[in-house]
Image (cartoon, rainbow, N blue to C red):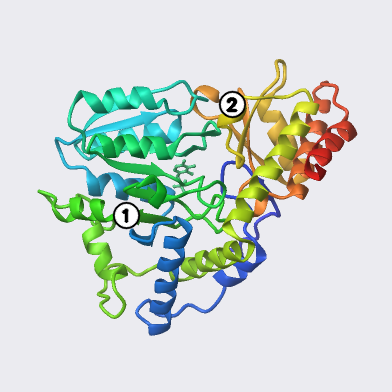
Amino acid sequence: MQSFQPPRRVLMGPGPSDVSPRVLAALARPTIGHLDPEFQKLMEEIKTALQRLFNAPDHACVPLPAPGTAGMEAAIMNLLEPGDRAVVAVNGAFGGRMADMAGRAGATVVTVDHEWGQPVDADRVAAALAEAPTKVLAFVHAETSTGVRSDAATLCGLARKHGALSIVDCVTSLGGISVDAAAWDADIVYSGTQKCLSAPPGLSPIAISKRAQAAITGRKEKVRNWLLDFNLLMSYWGGEGGRTYHHTAPINALYGLHESLVVLFEEGVQASTVRHARTHEALVAGLEAAGLKMLVDEKHRLPQLNTVIVPDGIDEAAVRAHALKTWDLELGAGLGPLKGKVWRIGLMGASATPWHVRLCLTALCEALAAQGLKVDTSAVLAASDARLAG
Ligand SMILES: *Cc1c(COP(=O)(O)O)cnc(C)c1O
């Protein structure tokens, strides 16, 4: 065997995003014991920082030791018991994954299905909640498979009105657009490190409300998975000094998350969302100047995940292959019904900069020209630059 040397890449797909040298350096610091008092201080700092980032001062916030999907699984397996009714809004791949998990938890699952590319329809969700007593409403805030933002405040409000607990997937939203667990009055909100936090994949920050905690401690039967059982987990991540061994925290990965939070707060959470919005506008201005069209209506677009319709006669995969080979640039493909029909361009965290926008537009224009589509690269870049200057 030989040491693995990854190629240099620029990551503009649906995640992971570029990881900054600061975060990479933090990951390489010496490993210490997970019960070391210095490590426990780090754990406390991360909990407090996550409460601040989710705006969840009254929620229990911890990073789960596995990628974003673990947050989803923890939320669903902790809240749902066999026979409970769950309403799951499905407007893309991740809503579908939530519905699958809720079924595995033994719940009676009612899905509210949407065409891919549409936001969750609050009226239809309200109708599903009104049909029968419901334990959980689950939905995705930022659907990465389509690039659509749904109205989390309204949907969490509906859950409250109907006596249901809300689960909000914020894997792609956190750090890129506003996430506000307190204002939404959301019960479980979870995210991942590899999207707009720009740390490597492998951790899932989660916030759990007092209401949700009471529902979990009051369960009739034990949570069916052990690692993510909130009752056991909090004996480890709970109050300072009272820690008992549960699992061994991914120590160096937590150094990385901690550094990514330091970086985010240095910039300012609000400033970061403004940066995502501005780079998104610059990208779209360039794409439109190239004659390309966006899948999602302007008012529902996510700045951090841009879904671009592949023009007729263009080989979708060949464009991505060209970008990777010639520019070391990773772009995302479509999933499910959008496979072969769209590109997904991520502007997440450290990948949301004017430099990334220019690189992506240049590579796209070149790849389209290679397939015979006429595009004026300098006009495309000028349109994008003008939007950033404006
Ligand atoms: C990426 C993503 C997930 C899953 O996160 P992993 O880190 O891949 O496990 C879940 N939900 C949404 C909306 C995502 O974008």
Please indicate whether residue 355 sits to the left or right of residue 126 in the image: right
Where 134 sits versus 174, above or below?
above
Find residue 332 and report its image quarter: top right
In the image as oriented, which residue stretches furthest toward the top? 312
Find residue 286 and report its image quarter: top right
- The percent coordinates of residue 374 (x first, y second) are 85, 22
Q: Indicate the amino acid at tag 1.
A: Ile
Quadrant where the image shows the N terminus: bottom right
Quadrant where the image shows the C terminus: top right
Give the label on residue 296, or none: 2
- The percent coordinates of residue 55 (x first, y second) are 44, 56
| Residue density around tag 1, few if under 14, some if 14–19, many if 20 or more, within 10 Å | many
Look at the numbered disc 1 and give the secondary structure of its residue.
strand
Report the number of discs: 2
Q: Residue at x 59, y 26 (%)?
A: 296
Q: Indicate the amino acid at tag 2.
A: Val
Give the label on residue 208, or none: 1
Q: Residue at x 38, y 55 (%)?
A: 206
Where 261 sits versus 131, above or below?
below
Q: Residue at x 83, y 34 (%)?
A: 383
Where 68 sits versus 264, above or below?
above
Residue 372 vs residue 205, the one in the foreground? 205
Residue 370 vs residue 187, the one in the foreground? 187
Q: Is residue 140 visible?
A: no
- The percent coordinates of residue 207 (x first, y second) are 36, 55
Mark 1 and mark 2: Cα distance apart in space: 31 Å
In the image as oriented, which residue stretches furthest toward the bottom? 37
- The percent coordinates of residue 330 (x first, y second) are 67, 43
